Amino acid sequence: MSALDWSWLPFGLDGFAWPWLLLALPLPWLLRSLLPPARAPGAALRVPFFERLRAIGLARGPARGSGGPALWLGALAWALLCVAAARPQQAGEPLRPPQAGRDLMLAVDLSGSMAEEDMVLGGRIVDRLTAAKAVIADFLDQRAGDRVGLLVFGRRAYAVAPLTLDRDSVREQLLDSVVGLAGRETAIGDAIGLAVKRMRAQDDADGDAPRVLILLTDGVNTAGLLEPVKAAELAREAGVRIHTIAFGGEGGVSMFGFRVQTPGGGEEIDEDTLRRISAMTGGRMFRARDTAGLAGIYAEIDRLEPVERPAQALRPRVERYHWPLAVALLLGFDALLLAGWSRRSRSAGAPA
């Protein structure tokens, strides 16, 4: 697009793709002025009354260089053809390029220990999974532009939502998850292995996107076929960064300044293994002992893994050459009809 100012153009046009073709506008007039008149192929016959015939011709038709309806229609058609050849363009509706974010997989522990009621949410005691759902749902709201997936694990690992830009569907799958859905034990290694497999499967769709796994658990690896450290090695080879969250209270909850004991609380979490998994893949290990701490961890992960903002909106150029081209063809056809009618009229009115 030319850098010239085309704001004077009508119909909202924004310029021409090939404005140099407008230089062809005066070409017919230059040719008419510079080239000699066409001569008849045969020998001319001069008669004594030649001057009288020329006077009659001048009286009945326009002389060379004078105007006429057909001539003016043809000139306007040529001008419009030049305009069409210059490709007039108009700015279309703004288009925003698709957001290029991360492939973010969430792995949530659904083992039996996630039913322990040692968390406070909204002033009431809730189990660990309920608190985790609330925090993760808020975290999803901040990930516009990321492809987010969800897998759950207990005795086995299951992918319940593939990597997708539809965060609402991921949230629905998360809220529908219940303790024991995948078994009562904990297969951390299988969960990591499944996440790596799913991310690899979508390499063709967006192979350059950073891949991140956020794994939340409250226990020790007690099931599965794949050891957590071996799974971490596979993740490192696949370029998957793992942030691990050890989530669970310490045998009670604090309400109004008093600690309320809960049965079964304070179970041991294998923090060393989780820390080693994160270190091997370039991620970080976090420890959350309450709902507020978990919310702060996800806020920190959101800072560590920022969403890439979309590029500036673009306005595509829409071709409008068909407008002047159609009018030029119509005017040219009218000029030909008018010129033919004028010749027939002169022939019919010539003296015998």
Image: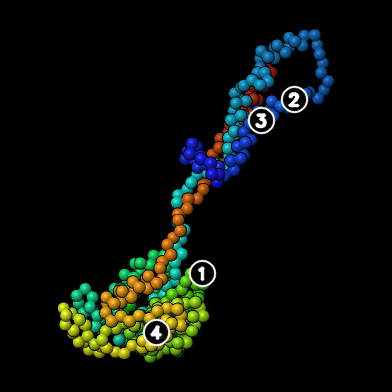
Q: Nearer the viewer, residue 8 or 178?
A: 8
Question: Residue visible at 63% across and 31% down?
Answer: 26
Mark 2 and mark 1 lie on one chain; the one further toward the N terminus is 2
Question: Real-space Cα distance between discs 4 and 1?
Answer: 27 Å
Q: Which residue is mark 3?
A: 28
Label of residue 36 in the image: 2
Mark 2 and mark 4 lie on one chain; the one further toward the N terminus is 2
Residue 97: image x %, image y %?
47, 58
Question: Real-space Cα distance between discs 2 and 1?
Answer: 68 Å
Disc 4 or disc 1, which is closer to the eye? Answer: 4
Using residue 255 as the reference point, say whether residue 75 is left or right of it: right
Q: Which residue is mark 1?
A: 208
Disc 2 or disc 4, which is closer to the eye? Answer: 4
> Do labels 2 and 3 touch, CB within 8 Å?
no
Q: Nearer the viewer, residue 71 or 145?
A: 145
Question: Residue visible at 51% across and 39% down?
Answer: 6
Question: Real-space Cα distance between discs 2 and 4?
Answer: 93 Å
Helix or strand or loop: what does disc 4 sit on? Answer: helix
Disc 1 or disc 3, which is closer to the eye? Answer: 1
> Do labels 4 and 3 touch, CB within 8 Å?
no
Question: Real-space Cα distance between discs 4 and 3?
Answer: 82 Å
Q: Which residue is mark 4?
A: 275
Is residue 21 depicted above or below 287 in this figure?
A: above
Residue 60 is at least partly visible in this image: yes
Identified by mark 2, the residue type is: Pro
> Do labels 2 and 4 touch, CB within 8 Å?
no
